[in-house]
């Protein structure tokens, strides 16, 4: 396990030098109406490699006027894009997927440098991006609805699905490229146009994606404006020409956008935080559990709304499972993704977020919690926290209730199934959970008793593009992936024809 890391030089962001901009030569511009655009403001912010703590670029800070410009471009492009047939849009999206595939390694390296992702995970995200675009291209050509027919005598009714218009997509820093694709894919396939606001911490792959697709998508169909949530996000949520706002982020971010959007009664698509319980029964394959938690709890440094972060285990196998989790955590190769493909866990995204996670740990220790391994930020460059397994956890401890969003797994023990289920459901979050057991009846029964949008059995954090991803309760009410996402980004219209003579 790496506790200190040599500082490495930042690699070039792309295969070509950025075009010069008027505001500041090194500042990365927005992308609006099919081209780079320097915007109306002069403020910039550094974009940092979290593994080294060093700036690798600068990005412009968008303004409300920049949002106006981008929305106007998207609205103009919508008039033509919406008229394309599903086949025509599908053809464009398949071409877009091919472009991403051609530049897959470049995008993966850019994602690793900006988000601190291990290269194998970054490559998986690019593969998921390609698959999402291809799936939506096919799904939009096969949408189903209630059959046209005579539901009132002498009148034929039919359901028509229409795009909603300009959609604002606000994406987080933990999966910058993949979550952008989860938005862009169904938004564009359904016939909408998009203004994307990536996280100001991790804008590089979104900007590069828009650049790469400039020769594929008509100008104005996809626009990217970088900036802070209270400025750019607020402007998008309140803009009168934005029909729907789609957010992946924290509960607080989703609440802010929903409040802002309420004034104009625009639709909101929310995929928010989680606190995924991992229910482990005595008959489970404990090695499989440990492997699953190591992957789903530590793989993206725990920065995942579906992370396997709260283990609830039967008392009789508690010590055995803790020993396995500690062994897996201590064996992980932690370091700068630039060191090579053997790195399994990278840094947290920013120093502020690293400090936030350490604050959770400090408060946990004050409550009597103990770290069986890890539990601190190591010395050296970058924003790292060691893979951590917390034990000796009192009832109601903060670390079991709140989303830490770091490489921290808590382990609690139970003797009764009902108590384990009640503890799992006793949270404001409802995004995902997993059940680990070899009992077929229990495996079939428990998912129905768990109040979460996704429940895995003997697995965790496995995704299928064909299946929806989204939660209940404070985890939001939007659905990403699958044909259900196309429903979220379209509207139904009833057309009735009176054919009486």
Image (spheres, rainbow, N blue to C red):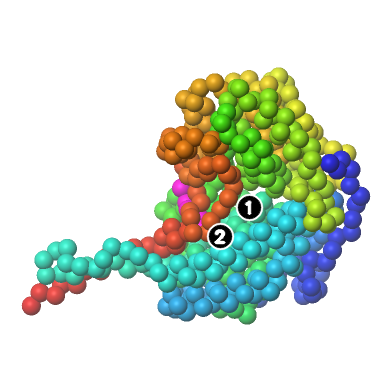
Disc 1, SS: loop
Q: Quadrant of residue 198?
A: bottom right
Question: Of label 2 and label 1, which has the lower sequence position?
Answer: 1
Q: Give coordinates of residue 44: x percent, y percent.
A: 75, 59
Q: Residues within 10 Å of mark 2 (few under 14, many from 20)?
A: many
Q: Which residue is mark 2?
A: 182
Above or below: residue 224 compared with residue 439: below
Q: Quadrant of residue 314?
A: top right
Q: Is residue 397 visible?
A: no
Q: Give coordinates of residue 203: x percent, y percent.
A: 69, 60
Magenta span: predominant SS is loop
Image quarter in which the C terminus is found:
bottom left
Between residue 83 and residue 103, name the one nearer to us. Answer: 103
Q: Is-magenta flag for residue 417? A: no
Residue at the spot 63% in from the left edge and 38% down from the top edge? 289
Disc 2, SS: helix
Q: Which residue is mark 1?
A: 172
**Span colored in magenta:** 476-481
Left or right of residue 340: residue 34: left
Left or right of residue 151: residue 286: right
Q: Residue furthest right?
A: 6
Residue at the spot 64% in from the left edge and 40% down from the top edge? 288
Residue at the spot 49% in from the left edge and 29% down from the top edge? 421
Q: Are marks 2 and 1 in contact (CB under 8 Å)?
A: no
Q: Is residue 159 visible?
A: yes
Image quarter in which the N terminus is found:
top right
């Amino acid at each position: 396990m790496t506790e200190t890391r040599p500082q490495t030089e930042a690699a070039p962001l792309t295969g070509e030098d950025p075009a010069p901009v008027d505001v500041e030569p090194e500042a990365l511009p927005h992308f609006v109406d099919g081209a780079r655009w320097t915007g109306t403001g002069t403020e910039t912010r550094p974009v940092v490699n979290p593994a080294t703590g060093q700036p690798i670029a600068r990005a412009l800070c968008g303004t409300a006027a920049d949002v106006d410009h981008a929305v106007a471009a998207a609205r103009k492009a919508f008039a033509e894009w919406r008229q394309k047939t599903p086949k025509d849009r599908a053809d464009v999206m398949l071409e877009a997927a091919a472009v991403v595939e051609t530049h897959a390694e470049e995008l993966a390296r850019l994602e690793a440098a900006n988000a601190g992702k291990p290269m194998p995970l970054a490559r998986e995200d690019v593969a998921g991006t390609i698959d999402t675009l291809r799936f939506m291209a096919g799904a939009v050509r096969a949408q189903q609805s209630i059959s046209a027919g005579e539901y009132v005598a002498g009148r034929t009714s039919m359901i028509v699905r229409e795009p909603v218009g300009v959609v604002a997509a606000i994406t987080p820093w933990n999966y910058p490229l993949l979550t952008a694709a989860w938005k862009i894919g169904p938004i564009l396939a359904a016939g909408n146009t998009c203004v994307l606001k990536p996280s100001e911490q991790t804008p590089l792959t979104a900007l590069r994606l828009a650049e790469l697709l400039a020769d594929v998508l008509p100008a104005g169909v996809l626009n990217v404006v970088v900036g802070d949530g209270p400025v750019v996000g607020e402007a998008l949520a309140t803009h009168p020409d934005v029909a729907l706002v789609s957010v992946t982020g924290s509960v607080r971010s989703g609440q802010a956008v929903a409040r802002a959007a309420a004034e104009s009664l625009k639709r909101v698509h929310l995929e928010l935080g989680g606190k995924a319980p991992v229910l482990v029964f005595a008959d489970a394959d404990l090695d499989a559990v440990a492997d699953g938690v190591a992957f789903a709890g530590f793989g993206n440094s725990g920065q995942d709304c579906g992370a396997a972060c709260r283990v609830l285990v039967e008392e009789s196998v508690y010590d055995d499972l803790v020993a396995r989790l500690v062994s897996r955590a201590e064996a992980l190769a932690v370091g700068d993704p630039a060191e090579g493909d053997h790195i399994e866990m990278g840094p947290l995204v920013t120093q502020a977020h690293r400090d936030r996670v350490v604050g959770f740990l400090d408060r946990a220790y004050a409550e009597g919690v103990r770290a069986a391994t890890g539990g601190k930020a190591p010395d050296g460059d970058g924003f790292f926290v060691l893979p951590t397994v917390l034990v000796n956890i009192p009832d109601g401890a903060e670390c079991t209730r709140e989303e830490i969003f770091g490489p921290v797994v808590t382990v609690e023990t139970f003797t009764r199934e009902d108590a384990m289920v009640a503890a799992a459901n006793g949270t404001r979050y409802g995004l995902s959970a997993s059940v680990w057991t070899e009992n077929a009846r229990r495996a079939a029964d428990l998912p129905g008793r768990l109040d979460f949008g996704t429940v895995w059995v003997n697995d965790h954090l496995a995704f299928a593009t064909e299946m929806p991803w989204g939660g209940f309760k404070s985890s939001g009410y939007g659905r990403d992936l699958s044909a259900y996402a196309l429903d979220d980004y379209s509207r139904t219209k009833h057309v009735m024809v009176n054919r009486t003579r």
